[in-house]
Image (cartoon, rainbow, N blue to C red):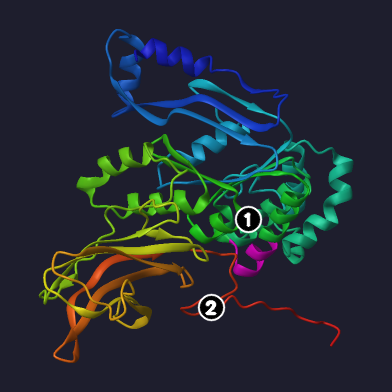
Amino acid sequence: MSFDELQEKQENPATCHLPLATTAAIAVTNLSKYYLIYNRPSDRLKQFVFRNRKYFHEFAALKNVSLTINKGETVGIIGRNGSGKSTLLQIICGTLSPTTGEVKVNGRISALLELGTGFNPEFTGKENIYLSAAIQGLSHQETKAKYDSIVEFSGIAEHILQPIKTYSSGMYVRLAFSVAIATDPDILIVDEALSVGDEAFQRKCFSRIREIQKRGGTVVFVSHSASNVIEICNRAVLLDDGELLLEGRPKEVLSRYHKLIFSPEGKRAQIRQDIIHTDLSKPLYNPDLQPETTIAYESRGAEIFSPRIEALDGTPVNLLERGKEYYFRYRVNFTVNSSAVRFGMMVKTKTGIELGGASVPFEDNEDGQVISGFSCEVRFKFKAILAPGTYFMNAGCSGLEGGERVSLHRIIDALMFTILPDTESISTGMIDFSIEADIDSNA
C-alpha cells in the first residue's frame, strides 16, 4: 500500500460506531489497523517531501478481522502479547480509528482498557470519578447519585480526596472498575486490568460481572488466565499476529492457543494453519499428543495394534471432557492357539501410578479358546472422571500356557490423553467422585 493510500485511510477512517438494529451487540467487519513505522525521525520529513518514495514500513496491528458478538454473550479475547487484542478493543470503544473496515455497536459501552485511562493524575480520586463518568456518558447529577456506591465498591474511601498520582496500581484499577460498572453499561469491556487488583477485589469484580450477565448485558473480556476465560465466557476468540485464527467454545479454543504458544518455533507456522482450518464441531484430537515412553513386550502368540480412544460416535479423540464417556479400542491378531484368553487395559498417571483398569475374558466359546490366525477388535467403554491433566493407557492380552497365565502381548504407554479443565466441577484431587454438597445455614 502506498504512502498516499495509507495516509488517506488514516485521515478518513471507515465509519465507526454505526447504530446496529439487530440482536448483535457488536459487529466488526473487515477491520484492519496499520501503523507507519519510521526508523529515524528524519525519515518522516523525507516521506512528506518525497511522496513517491517509501521511507517507512507498515506494521499491521489488525488484519481483516470480522467478528460478531451477540447481546448477552460474554466473549473472551485471548492471544499472545502483541496479537492485536488491545487494538481491537480500543477500536470497538472508539478511542482508536481503524484503517479499513467498520465497527457497529448497539448499546452503551463502558470500558476498562488500560490502567488509569480517562484519569487525570493531578486530580483527586473524587474529581476523577466525575471526570471518568462524564466521559462515559453520565450527567453530573447521575454521578452524584452513584458516588457513594462507587467509593464503597472501590474500597479506597480513605484515599478518595488524594491526587491519584499517589495511588498504587491496585488502587487505580479499583477506582476505574468501580466507575465503569456504575454506568450500568449494556456492554462492558475489560482489558486484562483486573489482573492488577488483589484476589479479594478480583472476586468482587467477577461477582459484579456475573450480575451484568444475569441482566442480559454483554461482556468482552481480555485475559491471559485460562481459568477465568473458561469460567465466565460463553465463547473465546483467538488472535495471533493481528489475525483472528479461531472462535468457539472456550475450552477448545484455549487448547489450541496453548498448543500454539508452547510449540517449537519451527512448527508455529504449520500449527497456525492447522488452527485456522480447525472444525470445532468435531471432538478434539491433538496429533502431537504421542507418548515417547511406549514399550511393546515381545509377542508370545498375539499382537496388539492400533490402540486409540474414540468418542461414542467413533471419532478419534485424545483431549477429553470430564464426565463424558469414551471408548478405548485396540485390535489383536493371534499367531498361536490360545485358551482362557483375557483382554486388559490400565490408566496411569505421568509418574506411573496405576489408577484403574479392567480385565475381561474372551467369551465367544466356553473356555475362551482362539486359534492361530484369529483376530478381533477389543473395546472398553469408560467415563472420564479424572482431574484435568495428562494420563497414559496400557493395553494387554493374556492366556493360559502350561496351566499358568502369561502375557501374550502387552503395550506399556500405548497412548496418552489429556483431561481438559472444568471449572464448573467442585471436585478436588485426582478422581471425580461426582460429589454433591449443600450447606444448611439454619442448622
Q: Quadrant of residue 71?
A: top right
Task: Judge depth for marks 1 and 2 and give the one in front.
Answer: 2
The image quadrant where one finds the N terminus is top left
Q: Residues within 10 Å of mark 1 (few under 14, many from 20)?
A: many
Residue under the image location 79 percent in, 62 percent down: 152
Determine whether, in the image, residue 195 is placed left or right of residue 300: right
Q: Which residue is mark 1?
A: 173
The image quadrant where one finds the C terminus is bottom right
Q: Which residues are magenta?
A: 197-204
| Label of residue 428 in the image | 2
Disc on the earlier residue, 1 or 2: 1
Asked if the magenta segment contains residue 258, the reply would be no
Where is residue 9? Give x, y as percent: 47, 15
Q: Are marks 1 and 2 in contact (CB under 8 Å)?
A: no
Q: Quadrant of residue 90?
A: top right
- At numbered mark 1, what does the secondary structure look like: helix, strand or loop? helix
Q: Say if residue 420 shows up in the picture.
A: no
Where is residue 158? Give x, y as percent: 75, 66
Name, please, the residue furthest toward the bottom: 403
Helix, strand or loop for the magenta stretch, by majority: helix
Where is residue 132? Give x, y as percent: 72, 43
Residue 309 or residue 416, whichever sits in front: 309
Give above or below for 418 relative to 106.
Answer: below
